[in-house]
Image (spheres, helix red, strand yellow):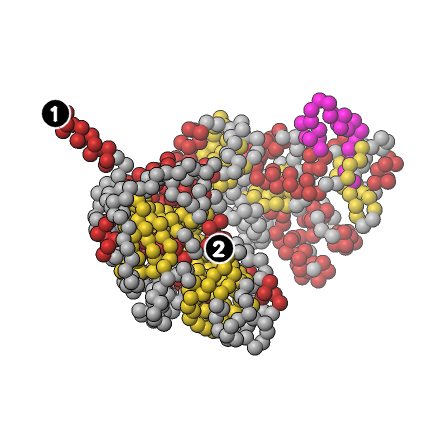
Amino acid sequence: MPVSTRRILALWLPRLPTDRLARRAKGAPESNRGEQFSAPLVISGKIGNALHVHALETKAARLGLYKGQPLANARAMVQPLAIVPADEKADAALLDAIADWCDRFTPLVSLDAPDGLFLDITGAAHLFDGETAMLNLVMKKIADQGFAVRAAVAGTSLAARALARYAHGSIVPPGGEAAAVAPLPIAAFECDDKILRALRHAGLKTIGMVATRLSSELSERLGKNFVTGLRVMLGAEEQPLAPRRPLPDLMAEQHFAEPIVTEHAIAASLLSLAQSLSGILEREGRGVRVLQAAFFRADGKVTRITIRTGEALRDPKVMLRLLNQKLDTLADPLDPGFGFDLIRLEALLAEETRPGTLSFDSDENARRQIGFLIDRLSVRFGTTRVQRFVAQDSHIPEAAGVAVPAQERDFEQQNWTLKRRPGDPPRRPLRLLERPEEISVPLSEVPDGPPLRFGWRSARFDVARAEGPERIAMEWWRGSVGEPEAREGVASGRVATPRDPQKNHPNLTRDYFRVETREGQRFWLYRDGLHHQLAPRWYLQGIFA
Amino acid sequence: MNKSAKLAELRHCLARYGLPPDRPPLALGHAGADAVLGGGLRPGALHEVFAAGWSAGSFAALLAIRLAKSKPFFWVRPDYEGMEYGAVSPEGLLELGGDPRQLILVRTRKTAQALSAASDILACPHVGALLLEIEGMPKCLDLVASRRLAFAAGTSGVTVIMLRSGAEAEPSAALTRWQVKSAPSRNDDDDWGNPIFDAHLTRHRLGGLGNFLMQWNPQHACFDTADIGAVAAAPAHRPARASRQRRA
């Protein structure tokens, strides 16, 4: 039987909903203490249309109430009884917050909704003086916060979970899962009532007894999933945990026995972390592209800031500078409160760096400096606000070039083709309006020709000369050019609102005219649709030099 | 040293106060303008372009294209300018002789952010040119901000072109100030040719002023003399206009 290589710590918070209420009552000001329940507290939930006991506090459990009991029965058994309807959202949020807090022990924390957590502590236990000490530490810290907690460590998640519920505090050595879970009752499977009933009918009362049966028998009766679950529980198979957040490629962290508060201390810690991360990166020949700093406050709040760089980065000073810049731009500044007891620097994405980093080539150096400048600007204003252009294979003017975040890729290879013949004036305007604006054209003098005058933005323009038409048909394979996917390309980056003219009759052919007004201003106009098809509407789309 | 020599030296010092360090000027291509400018536009300084009308703003972009040559060129603009004057089109830039691969566009929410982005960009000596587009007369763009830009430009040698639309000239640290509007092309011909600008050099801290008709040549990315009849040149030694009361 293969032995699982991971070590999983399962946490169970059996009284999460009632603990949440009790914690809130404790924190309330004196005058509101009336909310504290003197009677046993029960949380009611609905199954179908019937109310039942969703969760209950220890005091209520001692009186013989149990989870899943019909609420009417509970009421009949105990009088008085404080009953509060379940708030599953608040419970989930609280579990999330606890999971955040648990991040300080290992970056791989997985939710086991509604009231459990898995911590993958593989290779992390020695940082806390071994598994026993770590288990005790986790339990003590959570219990100190006012939660009832059960925990166990085993090689697979399901084994640890069953042990946390039925053999609290056990630590199973690698390979010992089968022996450890054997005496547990079959309820530890936490599966359907149907399956439990079937097992009971077969006279199987413990997991150990189930494990003695042939898997073919079991899968025939109870389904494949059950057999897989059983194998995981026995440690014969590993089941990967789903991490709550992306796992870092590399990380460096610093614990503080005494939480740090001052800006100076935080900066010093960040620098030393950046240096050690940079050391690891150097050894692996990699650089960081996405860097996250996580600040764990002593009271459990976790603040994370993320920076992205255009080029794999290794210099600790540059990392620190980018981090500081990001910290400066935060809407709500980093509040140390009672201090941070852990700061962690994670390389969420690390990339191979090209060899020859130290180049005396001045071009290479300039490229690097510009890349760093782009990174800094992107950190301050957001990646979508620092843009470069990518040529698109489209003849529609507003879709010909797309503005993309400048950090994204190399732009040197882009191919732009000139529209004008050498020696001719420009055929495309320097500025394109975010969306073409309708202009008022008095009835056209020549049926198919350019307007002689037009009104735009409450001004009138006399056309002195015009050139055109240049006929541009819309791409029939697109729904409508007014669609956001086609329009987003324009440097504006704003999500386009649907264009009225296109909504009514999409995909009209446009006849473009370059016109010069009497004062010498040059505009790009087009007529929507062919002249004989419908009453022409005119739009102004661009402004030439 | 006698008193008069000392005074002369002080005067010289004061005259040079706030001027950017000497760098070889870059010829614009227009002979008349280059002569007045003393060889061309000086890099590492702040140049202001006040545009009247819609097309004239391109003059600033053309100056930036000319100055950046093959180096990266940054265009910083608050969102409002994009809505009002249209988004920058890479195709249009290419048609004018620029290189879209070298253009890096920075869009900011507010004018103040645009100014701070500009000071970041000006700190990097590898930038070819910076075009800062600012509409109206925002409060944050005062003499101090303008001096700061000019100083940063002087230190790194990056030229900053400030494009002002819908604004009036106000005291600033700019080395040159241009009032530009577009000029109609030749009337007698069907071929209407390249864009022509009617550019008034209304402030020049190192020399004379002038009024030039400049035609952009996309082929060589430079300005030519526009040959549409003779236009009387403005007096060359007119003093810079007195500052107006700023609107609140």
Quarter of the image where one finds residue A35: top right
- What is the three-letter code of the residue carrying label 1? Asn
Residue found at x 49% / y 53%: B84
Magenta extent: A21-44
Asked if marks 1 and 2 touch (Cβ < 8 Å), the reply is no
The chain letter under disc 1 is B
Q: Residues within 10 Å of mark 1 (few under 14, many from 20)?
A: few
Instruction: Tell which of A300 and A510 is nearer to you.
Output: A510
Q: Which of the two marks, 1 or 2, is nearer to us in this view?
A: 1
Q: Secondary structure at mark 2?
A: loop
Instruction: Tell which of A41 and A362 is nearer to you.
Output: A362
Residue found at x 45% / y 34%: A254
Asked if residue A153 lies in the magenta stretch, the reply is no
Residue A528, position in %: x, y? 54, 69
- What is the three-letter code of the residue carrying label 2? Ser
Residue found at x 14% / y 27%: B4
Residue A391, position in %: x, y? 42, 64
Residue A175, position in %: x, y? 56, 47
Total numbered labels placed on residues in the image: 2
Quarter of the image where one finds residue A416: bottom left
> Is residue A452 toward the left or the right of residue A175 in the image?
left
Instruction: Residue under label 2, please give it.
Output: A492
Instruction: Tell which of A367 and A158 is nearer to you.
Output: A367
Q: Residues within 10 Å of mark 2 (few under 14, many from 20)?
A: many
Quarter of the image where one finds residue A213: bottom right
Instruction: Residue under label 1, please give it.
Output: B2
The residue at the far left in this view is B1
Asked if residue A22 lies in the magenta stretch, the reply is yes
Let me know if marks 1 and 2 both belong to one chain: no
Does the rendering let one see residue B41?
A: yes
